[in-house]
Image (tube, helix red, strand yellow):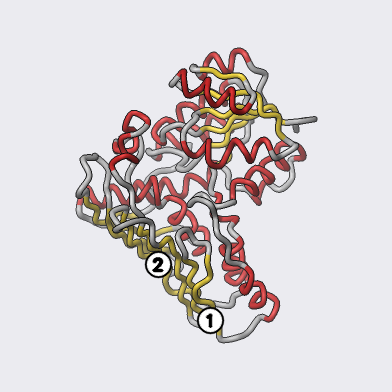
């Protein structure tokens, strides 16, 4: 356990750090935000100065020169396991932005090393903490849906050329970013498997790249069959004209239908159950919110829960760890494999050592 403030560095000064991490760290008294790190020297210095912290251009230099308890890894997706392992080797606790990794074997290696070094590994899945999704999860846990039948995810967003070209173009590279399935929709896929509450049985996907000179998929569809019989459907695109229109998840069961929509699962659009629950049904009336970005407000709750675990050892089950993050990576790997082969892919894909 950590006594006093948690000495923290942010690795990667890109958009998610600037939008969701810096302010959250500075507003949480459990953390001592001491440094940033980015391979772009001017960007590291800029955000170091803006946050009043030291700036580094090398992860090794950061780890050599700072006495850290905790790092948050916000580098390109394909580098998450590598950077996480560098911190874990030094006994530093790690939180990775989504996804935990691009490849399942690399995610497993990070999990194994963190276990070996006895450091905590967390995965940022902040949409689990949306007020709307927490109400939905509570309704599921109460059995209000009866037998759950389907879970549908729709992402209709817009990402232009500037999005793919900034930051040296890593968002357009398959090994570094993945496309709409990984880079935009991993939170929805994670929310799906979290709500369904069963391991997947098989997956099938069809993806395409159009209108953008990139390696990653811009749109596609997928089906995930879970072992409890639930069928999950994915309808994903970043070519929606003219801008972001919808980020929704819909659950249908024997005795209930709920759709959480808006631009990023921030509005309850349908809430119909055979049996009323006055307490929950009243909360629905005030659950909608308007996030400033698609990231929402979940990072605040994520950091609060992480602090509790690191300082007290309690609440481990209340925050997504490495093994929770692994679940979405396995589903994504199956979907890409299915698209590449044109065949359904069976689970499990691999096993942890």
Q: Position of 74 compared to 331: left or right?
A: right
Residue at horizontal 47 percent and vertical 24 percent from the top: 43
The residue closer to the viewer here, 122 or 260, is 260
Answer yes or no: is residue 197 visible: no
Quick check: 252 above or below 165?
A: below
Residue 238, position in %: x, y? Answer: 32, 52
Query: Could you say which disc has been placed on residue 31 in the image?
Result: none
Q: Determine whether the residue tagged by mark 2 lies in a helix, strand or loop.
A: strand
Residue 298, position in %: x, y? Answer: 59, 51
Q: Determine whether the residue tagged by mark 1 lies in a helix, strand or loop.
A: strand
Q: Residues within 10 Å of mark 2 (few under 14, many from 20)?
A: some
Look at the numbered discs 2 and 1 and tell me whether their residues touch, using CB distance below 8 Å. no
Q: Residues within 10 Å of mark 1 (few under 14, many from 20)?
A: some
Residue 120's quadrant in the figure?
top right
Query: Could you say which disc has been placed on residue 152 in the image?
Result: 2
**Inter-mark Cα distance, 2 to 1:** 16 Å
Q: Position of 202 compared to 89: left or right?
A: left
Quadrant where the image shows the N terminus: top right
Q: Position of 207 compared to 291: left or right?
A: left
Residue 274, position in %: x, y? Answer: 56, 86
Residue 66, position in %: x, y? Answer: 64, 17
Quick check: 304 above or below 67?
A: below
Residue at horizontal 42 percent and vertical 30 percent from the top: 79
Q: Which residue lies under the disc numbered 1? A: 272
The residue closer to the viewer here, 92 or 220, is 220
Answer yes or no: is residue 99 visible: yes
Residue at horizontal 35 percent and vertical 46 percent from the top: 333
């Amino acid at each position: 356990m950590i006594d006093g403030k948690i000495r923290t560095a942010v690795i990667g000064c890109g958009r998610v750090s600037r939008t969701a991490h810096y302010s959250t760290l500075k507003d949480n008294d459990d953390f001592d935000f001491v440094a940033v790190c980015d391979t772009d020297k001017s960007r590291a210095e800029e955000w170091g100065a803006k946050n009043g912290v030291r700036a580094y251009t090398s992860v090794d230099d950061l780890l050599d020169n700072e006495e850290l308890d905790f790092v948050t890894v916000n580098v390109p997706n394909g580098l998450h396991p590598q950077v996480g392992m560098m911190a874990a080797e030094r006994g530093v606790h790690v939180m990775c932005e989504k996804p935990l990794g691009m490849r399942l074997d690399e995610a497993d290696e990070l999990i194994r090393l963190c276990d070996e070094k006895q450091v905590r590994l967390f995965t940022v899945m902040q949409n689990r903490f949306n007020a709307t999704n927490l109400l939905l999860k509570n309704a599921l846990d109460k059995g209000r849906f009866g037998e759950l039948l389907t879970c549908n995810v729709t992402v209709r967003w817009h990402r232009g050329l500037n999005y793919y070209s900034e930051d040296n173009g890593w968002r357009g590279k398959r090994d570094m970013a993945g496309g709409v399935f990984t880079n935009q929709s991993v939170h929805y896929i994670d929310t799906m498997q979290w709500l369904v509450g069963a391991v997947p049985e098989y997956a099938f996907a069809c993806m395409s790249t159009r209108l953008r000179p990139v390696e990653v998929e811009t749109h596609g569809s997928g089906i995930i069959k879970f072992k409890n019989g639930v069928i999950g459907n994915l309808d994903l695109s970043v070519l929606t004209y003219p801008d972001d229109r919808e980020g929704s998840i819909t659950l249908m069961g024997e005795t209930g239908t709920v759709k959480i929509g808006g631009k990023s699962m921030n509005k309850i659009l349908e809430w119909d159950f055979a049996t009323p629950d006055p307490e929950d049904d009243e909360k629905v009336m005030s659950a909608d919110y308007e996030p400033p970005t698609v990231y929402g407000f979940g990072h605040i709750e994520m950091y609060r829960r992480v602090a509790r675990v690191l300082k007290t050892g309690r609440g481990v089950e209340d925050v997504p760890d490495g093994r929770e993050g692994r679940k979405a990576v396995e589903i994504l790997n199956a979907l890409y494999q299915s698209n590449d082969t044109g065949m359904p892919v069976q689970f499990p894909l691999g096993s942890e050592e």
